[in-house]
Image (cartoon, grey):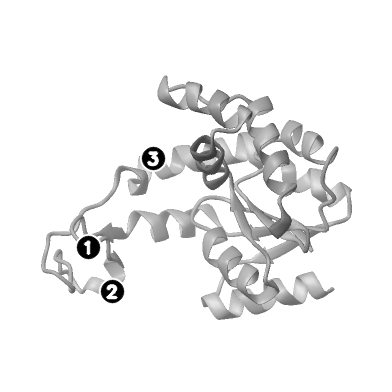
Amino acid sequence: MNIIFLGPPGAGKGTQAQLLTRELGIPQISTGDMLRKAMREGTKTGLEAKRYVESGGLVPDDVVIAIVKERLAEDDCKGGYMLDGFPRTVYQADELSKFAQIDAAVDLELADEVIIERLSGRRVCPNCNATYHTSQLGGSTVCKNCGAGLIQRKDDMEETIRNRLKVYKEQTAPLIEYYRNKGILREINCVGTVDEIFALVKRALEA
């Protein structure tokens, strides 16, 4: 089964994708992983991507699409795959459809304010990388594992989160309608525990 995961930052795409790939025995493929692999292996498109990355620029669509095409042609994708972080735009989705058959697009839905509360409350240990939420810390500001002071990453600050949500709605949210029109969209309300949401994902895919 070839699956795409959609949803705003903080909706739990990564967690659910990992659970599903283990359940189905298919690889989880992220744009970042693909770019790093292509650059490491020195493929033609990987070397082109490296030129943009090293200059601090964004990798153009045509390069990213070429790398996705290369990755999906590998043996481990023959039994299915999970695309995480691609496509990000309708243009990328159109290009993807020229060389890949997508069976389902899973959209994880969560209200903006819930996402902001979830992400802005996240605290990380700079020493051992342990992650906490302020609701679980009882006012503590130190890591329970190593005692280092916890920090809030810039990505988890409210202003940054609101901007990420704005970008998502402008660029990526149109994909929801795109895949709905194709009849393969599966919408999941991400309220509940990780296991409860995963059960909904599996049920939606079985349907």
Horizontal side, residue 131 vs residue 192: left or right: left
Label pair 3/1, CB-CB below 8 angstroms:
no
Q: Where is residue 134 in the image (x, y as percent from the top left)?
A: 27, 66
Nearer the camera: disc 3 or disc 1: 1
Q: Which amino acid does label 1 sit on?
A: Cys
Of pointers 1 and 2, the one earlier in the residue sequence: 1
Q: Which residue is drawn at 56% across and 50% down?
A: 8
Label pair 1/2, CB-CB below 8 angstroms:
no
Horizontal side, residue 142 vs residue 182: left or right: left
Residue 106 shows in this picture: no
Label 2 sits on residue: 136
Q: Residue at x 72, y 56 (%)?
A: 75
Q: Nearer the viewer, residue 54 or 130?
A: 54
Kind of element beneath mark 1: loop
Q: What residue type is labelled 2?
A: Gln
Calculate the distance from the C-alpha at mark 1 to the C-alpha at mark 2: 18 Å
Q: What residue type is labelled 3?
A: Thr
Label 1 sits on residue: 128
Label 3 sits on residue: 160
Of pointers 3 and 1, the one earlier in the residue sequence: 1
